[in-house]
């Protein structure tokens, strides 16, 4: 990359991070182009140069960060598989690790920002038109991770992701890590998947 391309990519990353921060703090309606530019410490012109509309910007931000988390998750699992491949029970440990990593990806501030867009898109056809293809791409990546590390049964893949998505929603106003609800749900589901695999 040239120096100009590197600066442009860095500016884009700052804008994407600022957009997610605004979504989490202020919701979709409070995530204006001006608010994002202010949060990023950049001019409104810089924001317009990289993203034509607010909807382009918010969808790009959520998809970008979701993809980064999925890439990091896959890299962690690949590393674990390389280190653990010969030990007894490696497959079960990797499946459980994948469930935990997927649960982390489908919770917290990034997930809250995504939910903001889902809700806003119900009454905003232009946003929905941009959001649906991005969500389909992220969903395909989630299914791929789940299929590779957890289960290759397509129905169980969907049920696994639905369980984790629901856990992420119910965790918006409760810390599942402290009260153990999410951990208990994942443990029960992990046991069920192991039992299904041995039938």
Image (cartoon, helix red, strand yellow):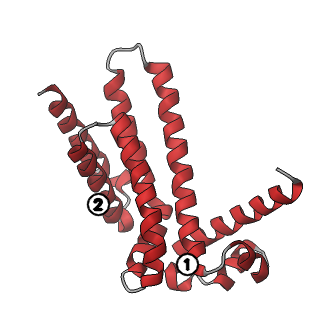
Coordinates of residue 67 in the picture (x, y in percent): 53, 53
Residue 139 visible in the current orientation: yes
Tell me, yes or no, if residue 112 can be seen here: no
Residue 117 point in image, percent of width and height: 45, 74
Write the residue at 75% across / 59% down: 9
Position of the C terminus, as image quadrant, is: top left
> Residue 111's spot in the image, x, y percent?
45, 63
Residue visible at 47% across and 82% down in the picture: 126
Could you tell whether 88 is left or right of 47 in the image?
Answer: left
Q: Nearer the viewer, residue 13 or 30?
A: 13
Badge 2: how crowded within 10 Å, few (<14), some, or many (20+)?
Answer: some
Q: State the residue at coordinates (78%, 81%).
A: 45
Local SS, label 1: helix
Q: Quadrant of residue 193?
A: top left
Pick whichever of labels 2 and 1 is earlier in the sequence. Answer: 1
Looking at the image, the residue that sits furthest to the left is 199
Q: Which residue is mark 2?
A: 166
Q: Position of residue 7 (x, y in %)?
A: 82, 60
Q: Nearer the viewer, residue 102 or 134?
A: 134
Q: Residues within 10 Å of mark 1 (few under 14, many from 20)?
A: many
Residue at mark 1: 55
The answer to whether residue 126 is left or right of residue 146 is: right
Element assignment for label 2: helix
In which quarter of the view is residue 139 placed? bottom left
Measuring 29% from the left and 60% from the top, which residue is drawn there?
Answer: 166
């Amino acid at each position: 990359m040239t120096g100009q391309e590197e600066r442009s990519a860095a500016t884009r990353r700052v804008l994407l991070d600022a957009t997610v921060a605004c979504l989490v703090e202020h919701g979709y309606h409070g995530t204006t182009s001006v608010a994002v530019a202010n949060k990023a410490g950049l001019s409104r012109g810089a924001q317009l140069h990289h993203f034509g509309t607010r909807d382009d910007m918010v969808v790009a931000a959520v998809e970008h960060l979701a993809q980064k988390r999925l890439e990091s998750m896959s890299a962690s699992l690949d590393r674990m598989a390389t280190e653990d491949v010969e030990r007894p029970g490696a497959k079960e440990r990797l499946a459980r690790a994948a469930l935990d990593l997927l649960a982390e990806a489908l919770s917290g501030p990034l997930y809250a920002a995504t939910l903001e867009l889902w809700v806003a898109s119900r009454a905003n056809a232009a946003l929905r038109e941009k959001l649906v293809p991005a969500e389909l791409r992220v969903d395909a990546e989630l299914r791929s991770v789940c299929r590779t590390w957890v289960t290759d049964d397509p129905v169980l893949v969907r049920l696994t992701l639905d369980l984790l998505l629901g856990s992420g929603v119910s965790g918006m106003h409760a810390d599942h890590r402290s009260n153990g609800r999410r951990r208990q749900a994942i443990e029960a589901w992990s046991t069920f998947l192991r039992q299904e695999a041995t039938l």
